[in-house]
Image: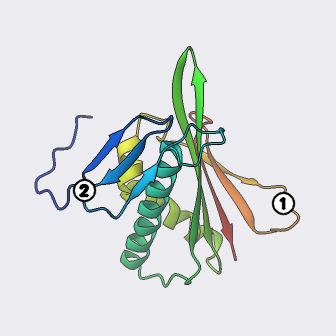
Amino acid sequence: MGLTQIERVLYTAKAHTTGGRDGGASRTSDGHLDVKLSVPGTHGTGTNPEQLFAVGWSACFLSAIKIVAARMKVKLPPDVAVDPEVDLGTSNGGYFLQARLNVDLPGIDRELAQALVDGAHQECLYSKATHGNINTEPRMYQLIRQPSPAVDRQFEIQFLDSGVEAFSFTFG
């Protein structure tokens, strides 16, 4: 599958970064985001690229859920949420990411929630951008019951082709 070319640019985000993740800083051209950067797991005072990626992907994924729900004429509850987890790790001497998007769809039945999450994964720009780069191609999945005494409604969708990316979501 080749790269999809954009026909019309709707928005271009611009930023300036100095110093990298160890004591650096990033600022967007409009000034709305101005952050100090720190290496993950250190006592630095800044955020790190993995946190920024987690925030961006989860915001996009939640918007994709809303788009899919509107197409399906499904009313979402106001407390729908996405809690991302982005792991920074190593393999074969290189650095890699892996991710989980924990989606909370309270009050939505299991089958419908699965359809919304599957549709959002196809719609979300970050899911498209990471497709094939951090093992995000969902071929087969299974629902796995999470051992959680506090939440008796939480399930995880584990993609079986890679075992790396998983989506969890809670049903009402």
Depth order, front residue of 18/58: 18
Q: Residue at x 41, y 61 (%)?
A: 60
Residue at the disc numbered 2: 29
Residue 28 visible from this viewpoint: yes
Tell which residue pokes out farthest to the left in this image.
7
Q: Residue at x 60, y 68 (%)?
A: 111
Above or below for 4 versus 120: above
Q: Is residue 104 left or right of residue 152?
A: left
Q: Is residue 81 left or right of residue 124?
A: right
Query: Secondary structure under badge 2?
Result: loop
Above or below for 132 versus 101: above
The picture places residue 70, in percent across and down from the top left corner, at 39, 79
Q: Quadrant of the C terminus?
A: bottom right
Q: Quadrant of residue 5?
A: top left
Depth order, front residue of 95/112: 95
The picture places residue 137, in percent across and down from the top left corner, at 46, 40
Above or below for 57 versus 88: below
Query: Secondary structure under badge 1?
Result: loop
Tell which residue pokes out farthest to the right in this image.
149
Residue at the disc numbered 1: 148
Q: Earlier in the sequence, mark 2 or mark 1?
A: 2
